[in-house]
Image: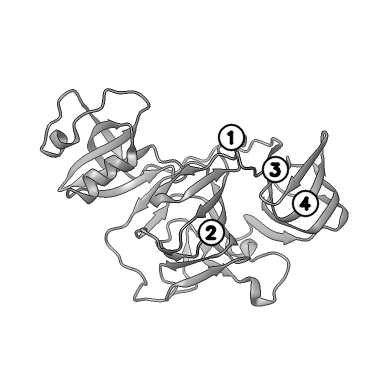
């Protein structure tokens, strides 16, 4: 019998973070998985083989958590739940998409209190990208976790973060301009961050499960920097390494993805190769020429459909753009 298939009590809640706090912090339940990370709506918890699925609902009625903790199942349903479902990969969809950063930009509270700004909405769920920030410095209330993904890259936009990874030795400091490839399933934990730390995270697929691992502690006793996770290798690219061009994502993903930081001047054009082409303006300003002209400044993002040309004008103020592509 598959141990990941369980009978779970379905518990609706209006505030998922509050419900998690009640069951896991004030009582003896343990978190197994939560998703999506950027705006959690489902969490699976367990206490001595008693499973509960917390589901965020906009409208009630909502049950009494104290009664549920004591064993009540009144007016609730039990469903069969797979705690480790197969990864579903949506097909590629090539749509132009753009967003700019403004005072009115939507930020939502995600996993462990981090703030998320969604950068991708129209790509059929094959890819997701988030602008993530932590406003306060100091220790981060994170735990050892992993992601059920095909691809995940983190680019440090501002500030720094201290993170520890499975089989990679002691913790690393990600500084502005650094990036990491987090291969599928690698266990990791965010330990600490600076004030105003911001990162750009690109995922495939967009919606995926984040699991908590209660069985290991980090750093690992064994260091194996060449270990492959689903055919991919952990990468920590450091901006001060003196290396230029592609950030190492191409090799680490075995040719599936690539990432670069470019510095366009004046007028700029680029023939695109790949099925997905994401751009994030790190610094400066420019005008994108597509079906019409679009103005971008720092914090803006856009996706160019496959087979189209990237054409920029009025590249000013030391323009710097992060580019991430899925290769054919």
* Element on which disc 2 rests: loop
| Callout in the foreground (4, 2) | 2
Q: Are marks 3 and 1 in contact (CB under 8 Å)?
A: no
**Residue that mark 4 sits on:** 285
Q: Is residue 25 left or right of residue 162?
A: left
**Quick one: label 2 or label 3, which is nearer the N terminus?**
2
List the residue tagged with mark 2. Answer: 196
Badge 3: how crowded within 10 Å, few (<14), some, or many (20+)? many
Residue at 26% x, 32% y: name it.
11
The quarter of the image holding the N terminus is: top left
Answer with mark 4 or mark 2, whichever residue precedes in sequence. Answer: 2
| Quadrant in the picture for residue 6 | top left
Earlier residue among tags 2 and 1: 1
| Residue 245 can be seen in this image | yes
Q: Residue at x 56, y 64 (%)?
A: 159
The circle drawn on residue 124 is 1
How many angstroms separate mark 2 from mark 1 (CA)? Answer: 31 Å
Query: Marks 4 and 2, Cα distance to the nearest angstrom?
Result: 22 Å
């Amino acid at each position: 019998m598959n141990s990941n298939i369980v009978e779970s009590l379905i518990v609706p809640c209006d505030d998922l973070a509050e419900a998690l706090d009640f069951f896991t912090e004030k009582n003896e339940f343990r978190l197994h998985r939560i998703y999506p990370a950027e705006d959690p709506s489902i969490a699976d918890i367990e206490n001595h083989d008693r499973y509960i699925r917390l589901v965020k609902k906009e409208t009630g009625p909502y049950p009494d958590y104290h009664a549920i903790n004591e064993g009540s199942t009144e007016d609730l349903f039990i469903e069969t739940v797979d705690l480790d479902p197969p990864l579903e990969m949506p097909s590629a969809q090539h749509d132009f998409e753009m967003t700019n950063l403004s005072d009115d930009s939507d930020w939502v509270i995600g996993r462990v209190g981090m703030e998320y700004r969604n950068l991708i909405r129209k790509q059929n769920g094959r890819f997701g990208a988030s602008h993530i920030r932590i406003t306060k410095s100091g220790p981060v209330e994170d735990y050892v976790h992993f992601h059920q993904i095909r691809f995940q890259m983190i680019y440090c936009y501002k500030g720094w973060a201290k993170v520890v990874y499975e089989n990679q030795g002691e913790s690393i400091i990600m500084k502005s301009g650094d990036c990491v490839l987090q291969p599928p399933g690698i266990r990791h934990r965010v330990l600490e961050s600076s004030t105003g730390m911001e990162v750009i995270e690109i995922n495939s697929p967009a919606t995926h499960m984040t699991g908590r691992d209660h069985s290991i502690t980090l750093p690992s006793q064994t260091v194996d920097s060449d270990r492959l996770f689903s055919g991919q290798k952990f990468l920590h690219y450091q901006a001060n390494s003196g290396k230029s061009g592609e950030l190492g994502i191409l090799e680490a993903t075995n040719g599936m993805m690539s990432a670069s930081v470019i510095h366009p001047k004046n007028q700029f054009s680029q023939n695109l190769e790949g099925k997905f082409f994401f751009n994030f303006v790190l610094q400066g300003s420019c005008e994108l020429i597509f079906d019409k002209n679009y103005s971008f400044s720092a914090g803006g993002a856009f996706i160019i459909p496959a087979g189209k040309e990237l054409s920029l004008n009025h590249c000013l103020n030391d323009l710097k753009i992060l580019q991430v592509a899925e290769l054919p």
